[in-house]
Image (spheres, rainbow, N blue to C red):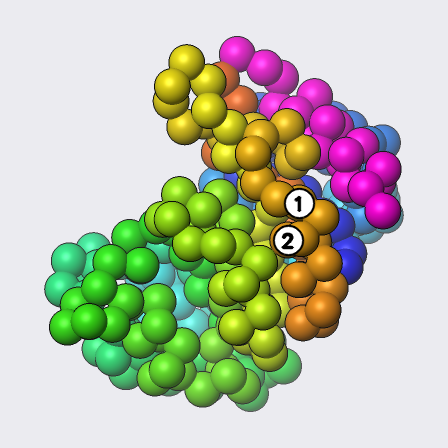
Amino acid sequence: MNIGAQLYTLRDQMNNDPAATLTRVAEIGYKHVQVSGFSYDASELKSLCDNLGLQIQLTHTPPERILEDTAAVIAEHKRMACPYVGLGGMPFEYRCTGDAKKFIEDFTPAMQAFAGAGLKFQYHNHAFEFECFGGVSMYDALINHSDPALLGFTLDTYWVAWAGLEVPALIKRMAGRIDVCHLKDLAIIENQQRYAPVGHGNLNWPAILAAFEEIGTQFAFVEQDDCYDENPLDELQKSYTYLEETP
């Protein structure tokens, strides 16, 4: 897989000094980034990344823009040479009812437009998708009722583990559906679940990484939603070092 940095981890730094922040990301060794959680101009961001040898591969784009401003979203992704249009979370009106079929119905025109432009839509999970409605989880319903050519899944390792599932087993079951993923560790500190750099928590990374490789996942983005009192760039460095040293 190609290892990248989910810039949501660095959202405050990206809003304050994107050039210096991206320079440090490149110095760590990352070659790919996901855009999420900060304001940006697509052309300016692409120029910054080009100068540093970084490639933008995925976004998290607000659902209302995906539905109501589809053409502009496509144009922005084209300017950034970004192949994947990501949704970071399920809008509440679908989440509260578990209505995956309605979500697919409403978003299909945008997904078709993305596909027609050579892009692909990606859905990012949290834990709530694994709640069952009528004996079927919303996540399974999303898989079962969507077209694999139109909808991919940005599987987030932390949230799958948080929901109580065995991460490598789910990855293997979803072969052909996971183009990109989020690598995020789960640690227990003072009896509380915490985000952690990859390799610094309790997830079985050799098995997880092998599963992603087995099914052909293309890009893996390191993400840490909260770095607590640590510098987020230092946390991304820890994750990168672990991944580089893991056979």
Amino acid residing under circle 1: Trp
Q: Residue at x 31, y 59 (%)?
A: 129
Could you tell me which secondary element the residue under label 2 belongs to?
helix
Dot 2 crowding, Cα within 10 Å, few <14, some 14–19, many 20+:
many
Q: Residues within 10 Å of mark 1 (few under 14, many from 20)?
A: many
Query: Is residue 190 shown left or right of residue 48?
Result: left
- Is 185 magenta? The answer is no
Asked whether 233 falls inside the magenta stretch, the response is yes
* Type of amino acid under label 2: Ile
| Residues at discs 1 and 2 in contact (Cβ within 8 Å) | yes
Q: Quadrant of the N terminus?
A: bottom right
Relative depth, front residue between 189 and 231: 189
- In percent of width and height, residue 36 lies at 52, 46
Figure disc tally: 2
Q: Is 222 placed above or below 101 here?
A: above
Q: Quadrant of residue 100?
A: bottom left
Residue drawn where x is 72% and y is 58% of the image: 210
Q: Which numbered marker is on residue 30? A: none
Seen at 25% across and 79% down, the residue is 101
Q: Is residue 128 visible?
A: yes
- Per the model, the C-alpha gap separating discs 1 and 2 is 5 Å
**Can you say whether 74 is above or below 9 in the image?**
below
**Residue 153 in the image, given as x and y percentages of width and height:** 50, 67
Q: Element at badge 1? A: helix
From the viewer's side, name the closer residue of 226 and 212: 212
Which range is magenta? 229-247
Residue 199: % across, % down: 67, 34
Location of mark 2 (residue) = 208
Q: Which residue is mark 1?
A: 205
